[in-house]
């Protein structure tokens, strides 16, 4: 069920998208993380201002929320974002494990203004040897040795 608080939070995400755009920080995207009906972190796209292709609004907000909560997971939180998350942000959201995501614009709306992520979805489905960026498997056994040590590690933190 959508509440009045949800409407307020999505409105704030949209305001953040405008703020970032007006500050020339990056694209028109904003996001926030809420826990117990309180905003604990906010972010807007900072890709171009920080020269960081990962500085999408959702990632910025998730990083800040995790710092504040001193946790790498947001299990009791809700993410509000001005646009349906791109594949990278979708991955970050799933790793953070919030209980819900509210979004305003759709990925189709984003594509209409030049933010089309369809090629990434297609690349994910493409065999690794046929992707547009060359992926080269090198020293798999050396890498697997570290994985074997991880499996044996008694003091690891699983996630």
Image (cartoon, helix red, strand yellow):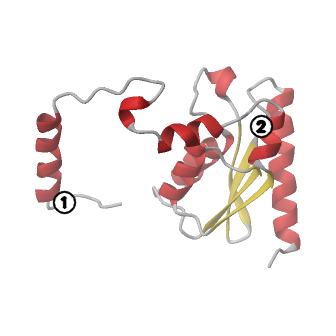
| Place of residue 10 in the rendered image (x, y in percent of width and height, measured from the top left) | 82, 57
The relative height of residue 132 versus residue 105 in the rendered view (above or below) is above
In the image, residue 93 sits, relative to residue 63, either above or below, namely below
Q: Residues within 10 Å of mark 2 (few under 14, many from 20)?
A: few
Q: Which residue is mark 2?
A: 111
**Looking at the image, how many numbered discs can be counted on the residues?**
2
Q: Residue at x 56, y 33 (%)?
A: 54
Residue shown at 58% from the left, 45% from the top: 87
Q: Residue 4 location in percent, x, y?
A: 88, 72
Give the image quarter of residue 146. top left
User: What residue do we see at 58% from left, 51% from top?
Assistant: 90
Which secondary structure lies at badge 1? loop
Image height check: is 107 above or below 26?
A: below
Q: Nearer the viewer, residue 132 or 70?
A: 132
Residue pushed farthest bottom?
A: 1
Along the viewing direction, whichever of 145 and 110 lies nearer the viewer: 110
Q: Describe the element under mark 2 as helix, strand or loop.
A: helix
Spatial CA distance of label 2 from label 1 is: 45 Å
Label for residue 155? 1
Quadrant housing residue 27: top right
Q: Which quarter of the image is occupied by the N terminus?
A: bottom right
Q: Give residue 118's position: percent from left, percent from top.
A: 65, 39
């Amino acid at each position: 069920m959508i509440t009045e608080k949800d409407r307020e939070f999505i409105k704030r995400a949209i305001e953040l998208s405008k703020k970032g755009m007006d500050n020339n920080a990056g694209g028109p995207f904003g996001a926030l993380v809420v826990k117990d009906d309180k905003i604990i972190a906010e972010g807007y796209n900072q890709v171009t201002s920080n020269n960081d292709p990962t500085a999408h609004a959702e990632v910025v907000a998730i990083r800040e929320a995790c710092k504040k909560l001193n946790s790498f997971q947001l299990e009791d939180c809700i993410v509000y974002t001005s646009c349906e998350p791109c594949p990278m942000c979708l991955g970050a959201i799933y790793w953070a494990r919030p209980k819900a995501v509210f979004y305003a614009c759709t990925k189709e709306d984003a594509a209409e203004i030049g933010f089309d992520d369809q090629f990434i979805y297609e690349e994910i489905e493409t065999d690794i040897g046929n992707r547009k960026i060359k992926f080269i498997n090198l020293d798999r056994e050396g890498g697997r040795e570290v994985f074997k040590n991880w499996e044996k590690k008694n003091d690891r933190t699983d996630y």
